[in-house]
Amino acid sequence: MKHIPFLIAITGTLLFCLYNLFSGAYQNKAVSPSWRADSVPPSAQSCKTCHEKYVDRFQGAPHSRTLLSGTDPLVLSRFGDKSYANEHEKAEFRVHGGRLHYHHSNYPEPVQVDWVFGSGSHAMTPVSLISNAQGKDQLVQLRTSWYPNNELGPTLGQNTNADSLSGVERIGKLSDHAETMNCFGCHITNIVPTESRLTEDTVQPSVSCDRCHPGSVKHLQSQESGNESHGQWGLDWSKMTAMESVNRCGGCHRRADEMNPEDLTTQETDLPRLASVGLTLSPCFHPEARPGSAEYLTCTTCHDPHAPASKIALDYVQTCRKCHSENSPVSVTCSNKPDSNDCLDCHMPKVEVAPHLKFTDHWIRVRND
């Protein structure tokens, strides 16, 4: 009888955990990107002495241009003197003094474009920064973005008629300072210690080596001193399970455990944007698989993070056929088109999530549509 109170307590704790698990309380695990290094990380060029082929390939990779200044030549060429209009508004980008400015019919004065988010593989979205009452930067994500067809269009999620909005939100979505820091956190290598301003002097833009290989400072120092060990990395990708690897990418590309279960359904039209989430929902995905095993499938199985993504479908089909072939002990062959190379068209089609904007759906599955 003396064990009954203990058993009741344990049972109560288990029921509470199960309730929270299935009610979604443990699903919204916001993952803040690790964007502030202990010391300023070296540039990619500093790594070139030993890793020349990776650094050279990386120059064309989307991660090398996730954040550009409003004065960047690529930004000026893609946005300068271009306009977009619909029945409710007209937006135009003009270059003044070597910097991009945004003119909007629903706002009394032009605003300076401070930064542009996005590599251009899917879109490039300009942002302006304003100071709040405490003197800290807040991000205004402008209503008009650039798309790969070289046309401007509405920024994703900003189709609301600007007439129904007020103040600065007439020209874009306003984020508070904390959210602003997290937004920048996924598009940079490092921010020098600051709690207020995000200037070209305080931001190391785009995602460089240290974001995926933390510890690069010690590694470089060790190499320069002739230490045979070349220093210890802060992250060893070769020892990660499939889920650990995908979640590392998902820190910025989203993780399934950040989301509610009701959002992880085929009816959720936004999921194709979240490749790392879709992959973990796939029957092909084995969370505990380890590098070297036949079941190991992660983002880097198909995508070289140091290079632009291949545009050749057959490159990806060959990866599919490593498992989905007659000789594979891991998976079955396709029953519908066993000799076809149309794997992607059926199981990973491109989905339009907004005008001008398509994403490959990484939730690999048999579809009924």
Image (cartoon, rainbow, N blue to C red):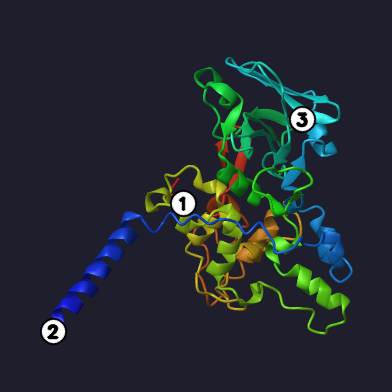
Q: Amino acid at mark 1?
A: Arg
Query: Can residue 60 be seen at all in this image of the molecule?
Result: yes
Q: CA distance from mark 1 to mark 2?
A: 56 Å
User: Measured from the top left, where is residue 338 in percent x and y?
Assistant: 55, 62
In space, the residues marked 3 and 2 are separated at their CA atoms by 75 Å
> Where is mark 1, residue-wise?
367
Locate the N terminus by quadrant: bottom left
Residue 363 seen from this side: no
| Element assignment for label 1 | loop
**Which element type, helix, strand or loop, lies under badge 2?**
loop
**Residue 238: quarter of image:** bottom right
Q: Which mark is residue 2?
A: 2
- Residue 180 versus residue 210 in the image, above or below: above
Viewer-side residue, 280 vs 247: 247
Mark 3 lies on residue = 79
Mark 3, Cα crowd under 10 Å, few <14 / some 14-19 / many 20+, is many
* Residue 276 in the image, given as x and y percentages of width and height: 56, 57
Q: Nearer the viewer, residue 334 or 364?
A: 364
Of the two numbered discs 3 and 2 in the rendering, the one whose residue sits closer to the viewer: 2
Q: Are marks 3 and 1 in contact (CB under 8 Å)?
A: no
Tell me residue 196's x, y (percent).
66, 44
How busy is the neighbourhood of tag 1: few (under 14 within 10 Å), some, or many (20 plus)? few
